[in-house]
Amino acid sequence: MKDTRYKGLIAELKVMERATEKGWIASRPMISARYDLILDDQKQLWKIQVKYADGHKQNVAGSVVVELARRRQGYKKNEIDAIIVYLPVIETLCWLPLEVFDRHLRISIRHTPAKNNQVARCIMASDYFW
């Protein structure tokens, strides 16, 4: 089983690869910060937190849990601009804007539709592919 740091590094490398494909510049902060990367799309600098999401909720198929809190403190809008989540189960990245994760300590992202067809309050990975 891979440890958290190893998974985080995999996710960061996937984000940097995708940024390069898009012609963006990816940089790491020189000191400890609440964000993992700065992405430069040549219009704006984005403070990005990167997550590797392979945690599953009990009794829920088709979704993964993304832990957002450290010491029970979620991210504030002045700390990061977006979260990019790597979902290894579908080998893709999702760009989550602030309104998706603001004031949450964890979120669930569905990578397959719910069996009961629920869509209300569901974060569908396909809506945020990057």
Image: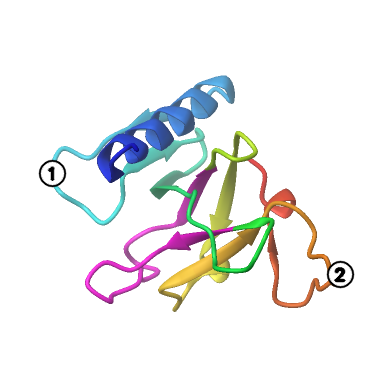
Tell me which residue sits at (39%, 31%) in the image: 10
Measured Cα–Cα span from mark 1 to mark 2:
45 Å
Image: magenta residue range: 64-86
Q: Nearer the viewer, mark 1 or mark 2?
A: 2
Label at residue 31: 1
**Pointer 2 local density, CA inside 10 Å: few below 14, some 14–19, many at least 20:** few
Q: Is residue 99 left or right of residue 102?
A: right
Q: Tag 1, which secondary structure? A: loop
Residue 85 part of the magenta-drawn span: yes
Rendered-image quadrant of the N terminus: top left
Name the main secondary structure of what is drawn in magenta.
Answer: loop
Residue kind at label 2, given as amino acid type: Asn
User: Where's residue 92, x and y in %?
Assistant: 61, 37
Q: Quadrant of residue 129?
A: top right
| Residue 48 is one of the magenta-drawn residues | no
Q: Where's residue 84, x and y in %?
A: 49, 47
Which residue, given by chain and number where applicable, does mark 2 sit on? 117
Q: Is residue 71 above or below residue 37?
A: below
The foreground one among 35 and 12 is 12
Q: Which mark is residue 55?
A: none
